[in-house]
Amino acid sequence: MTMTATRTDPIVLTGAAAEAKLAEVRASLLADRLVPFLGPDLLTADGAAPPVPSTPEAIAAALNAKAPAPSRIRNSMWSVAQFIEQRRHRKTLIGWMAEIFSAPVAPPKLMTFLAGLPLSLVVDTWYDGAFRAALKAAGREDWIEIQGVTRSGESRDIWFKAYDPAGMEVLPEVAETAKTVLYKPHGAITPAKNFLVADSDYVEVLTEIDIQSPIPAIVKDLRTERGFFFLGCRFHDQMLRIYAKQIAKRSAGGHVAVVDVARLTKNELRFFADLGATVVDLPLVEASEILVG
């Protein structure tokens, strides 16, 4: 079944039409025509709960357990993290985030499948190290990871850092020769505990995001000939929508998103409509089986 797009609602596919669209997506991934844009729900694609938080709200709860925040901000990860940074110091916030994400996350089957493909670019928006682990498990050495970093405590004009498969920091320009670029715009636990998590981390980023300064040059280059495939993502917060829209800016289009439409807010539906994305309304576990084959 296909629902026609309106100004505020995207095209939504269900049933056989949704399954057929995923078959097209699989072919596009194999041909390197789509960029996976991965969110934390992907960690549940095998049907099991991951050993780390898989929502911003779960991180907020974990941080709040360490330093109770005012009730008005208790459910906002960004605000709770800012509360801790202001009262306990940045090092405390990073240390607690490292504790919260200390458990290794086994890559789900779909992530393992993606790690084995000749994809030029993968965007992974969560803080775990599962995709890095999947690339290493595949025996690959032809990739570079670029992570967004906080400007807190930095004297340089810096927005991101790059790392090789061994976890050593390298110049971002090295990514130009990599077969695959793994882009973690919000940072990650591995290899260097970079976390964009507090409100203050995003003040300068969102100030300059419209002119694309925080987006690595290689990401801007690779997206021009590709669309994005959103998988395991929620965009129920304005900051998440702004960041994702800027990453997808000036790309080739033809975006596709796998989501549970019943869970989406009106703002999320409008976000996909604005992107011109086709929404595939299937459970993530079922979508994973179709994509892996």
Image: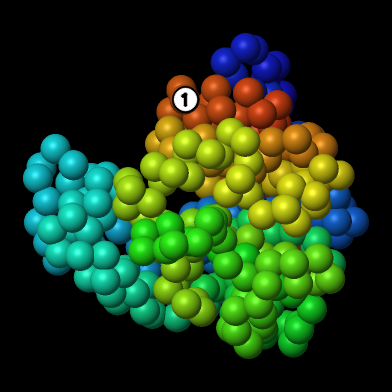
Camera-side residue of 284 and 232: 232
Image height of 192 relative to 76, above or below: below
Please state which amino acid type lies under the numbered disc 1. Asn
Residue located at (70% from left, 32% from top): 278
Is residue 207 visible to the viewer in this orientation of the structure? yes
Circle 1 SS class: helix
Image height of 4 relative to 228, above or below: above
Camera-side residue of 286 and 222: 222
- Callout 1: 10 Å neighbours few (<14), some, many (20+)? some
Residue located at (58% from left, 67% from top): 161
Left or right: 50 as drawn, with respect to 217: left
Corner quadrant of residue 165: bottom right
Image height of 19 relative to 45, above or below: above
Q: Which residue is mark 1?
A: 267
x%, y% of residue 48? 45, 67
Camera-side residue of 193 and 61: 193
Q: Report the quarter where the N terminus lies.
A: top right
